[in-house]
Every structure is written in C-alpha cells, then in structure tokens.
Amino acid sequence: MAQSSPMNGGDGIYSYNKNSSLQRNGLNAAIELMKEALMENIDVKNLVGDSNTITIADLGCSVGPNTFFAMQTIIDILQHKYHHDSKTLEFQVLFNDSVFNDFNTLFASLPDQRNYFAAGVPGSFYGRLFPSSSVHVVFTSSSLHWLSRAPEELSIKHSAAWNGGRIHYTGAPEKVVKAYVDQFEEDMGVFLGARGEEIVGGGVIVILMPGVPHGLLTHDIGIALTFLESLLIDLVKEGLIDQEKFDSFNIPHLYPSVEQMKRVVQKNGDFEIVKMELITNATPNLDAPINIEGAIMHLRAFSEGTIAHHFGSSEIVDQIFDRALLQKTKFSHMLYPSGIKIPAQLFAVLQRK
C-alpha cells in the first residue's frame, strides 16, 4: 500500500525546487483573494493582544522557493493591515513538512534579508504539531490533497473497493471513489481538529489545493496519474514489475469540490468559512500550449519518492520517466481532449471561532 513521501529534495534537475512552477502559478492566482480575505477579516491588534509577535505556519512547505514567497506575502499583508499602529510587529514562521523532507535544502535557501524568525517543525499535519492557541495564521498550499495514506481496502482483492490494475480513483468504480472520499473526510476531520486546538481565536487557515467542480472527479493531476499508470502497466507486462506489487500501489491523492470541503469544515465546527471557491485561472496564459516535458518533470518531482518507496528501487523510477519522455505525445493527447481547465485550485480561508 502506497504512502505519501516528500517531494524530491536537493536542487538537481529532478528536484521539487526546480519543478514547482505549477504550484507557484496556483499561488499567484490566489494572492489577490488572499489579500482581500486577510485584510477584511483579521483584526491584527486583537489577534496579538499584549504581545507583538505573530506566528505563521506553512504546513507542507517542501523545500522552497514557493514557501518563502507565500510567507513573505502573508507578512506583507499583515504589516500593511497593522501599519497605523505604533507597536512594531515581529514574525515567527514555522516551516512544517514530513520528517523525511529535505529541511537542509530548505534552510540553506532561506532569504538573507528576511524579516522573520524561522524554525522547522517536522511531522505529519494529520495530528498536533504546535502548542494550544499558539499560531495565528496557518497556510497550506498543494499539500492537503495528499491523504495520510491510501485506503487499505484498495489493495485487498476480495474488497468491493479493490483497485487492482489502477493507481488512483480516476476512471475507477464508485466503491473505489468512495474509499478515497471517506479517507479524505477522516483526514480532514483530524487536520481541522488539530488546527482548532493550535490556532488562536480569530486566527485563520489559508488553503490552496487542487480541486474540481461539483459533480466532477477528474483533475489534470489525475490524468497525469493515469498516464503514469499506463507506464507501470507496460513494465508489468514486460516482467519488470511484479503484478501484485503493482496492484497494491495507489497514489494517496484526492481533489475535492467546494461542496465536499464545506461539508467537512461544517462537521468540524471550529471554523467559520470566510471564503471558499474554485480558481480556474491558475496559469499565466490559459491558451498557451502545455509544456509536456515540464509536466513530466513535475510529475516526477512529486511522485518519485512515493514510487521508489513502494517498489523498493530508485532504478524503476528512471525507467518509468525515461519512457514517459518517449511517450510525451501520448500524454499530450490525454491532456488536451480532457476539457479540463488546467489546473483548477480550491481556495479557502477559514477563521477560528
């Protein structure tokens, strides 16, 4: 059963550091919405009380540079909101990701001229990370679609949700989709419960993640995973991957609709929904051709660790993505007729009651 692994570390050609422009495009699309929501809903003076320190946490920060851009953007917004007061604010930024994340690369890349204190907090955000009522702003981008694990029933042959021959719920039967949805709702319940303990009253969570319109399941990332699936099937047919090992491999991703996300937030009850909508203009030019080779590099940057961990070999990763580049025309044909606006992002701001 596949478990999520951190993005590719380091600064090499296959690193997340060099292959995260799609995530940056999504962040760029949300900046004005984020500014508007924070300016209108955060009362900085009441938030900090007698202190002058604001604590911001980025959950799923990876290795940068997107996290530094996001953190500086939030700090700039809060400083602008508070500029009329005589008290000088100080900022503490807590960078969180898996214990296997490349924190060395992250901290070696910290901006020299930053106006905040930085610290790393390793661990899963599906659980407590910080002391009670200690965080003012939580930010998470391109992270919450990673489930805590792939649902166990997907790899059990006699289960109604057995997903043999596929690696995701894209194109899968309803029982498989339901298993993913149930896992997402369980994980989000844990996530919101933990953040409800950690965030001060009036503090916020800013969420940016892949999302889909109501009633639809397919996202462009899901199409990329279907392409990846086809490459793995070829390796199984050639005897390079064991069939049972392949059948037990399921990428732990889910891309929710606004309605799904609203449901889990309302069930939790700790947060008010300030803003929640789907952003469909997350690329600079929607009419520009898709950079297929860039999309393949992006796919490798976020999936390599999960593939290598499950199949127990980094060599298989090279074989998969060498073939991916040779079959890039096939990938292009899968993406273009999909009719999906690429990429769709769910944007949300939640405020602690």
Image: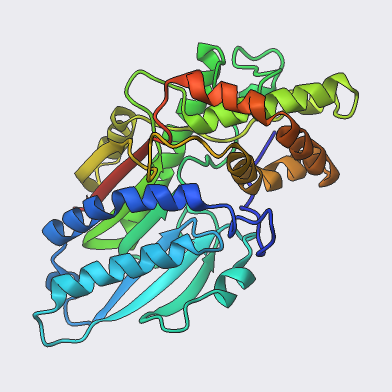
Q: In which quarter of the image is the N terminus?
A: top right
Q: Which of 302 and 326 is in front in this view?
A: 326
Q: Pick whichever, 197 or 272, lies toward us.
A: 272
Please tell me whether residue 178 is drawn above or below residue 303 in the rendered image. above
User: Looking at the image, is 248 positioned above or below residue 70?
Assistant: above
Res 169 seen here:
no
Tell me which residue sits at (57%, 22%) in the image. 334
Q: Is residue 44 left or right of residue 215?
A: left
Please state the horizontal and vertical placement of residue 232, each as a whole percent of the image: 76, 27
Rendered location of residue 214, percent (x, y) = 32, 22
Q: Position of residue 289 (x, y in %)?
A: 49, 35
Q: As displayed, is residue 269 above or below residue 340?
A: below
Q: Where's residue 216, x and y in %?
A: 39, 20
Who's the residue at 17% across and 72% down the image? Answer: 80
Left or right of residue 341, residue 226 in this image: right
Q: In which quarter of the image is residue 134?
A: bottom left
Q: Is residue 129 left or right of residue 10?
A: left
Q: In which quarter of the image is residue 117?
A: bottom left
Residue sitting at 17 percent across and 82 percent down?
50
* Number of numbered tags placed on the structure image: 0
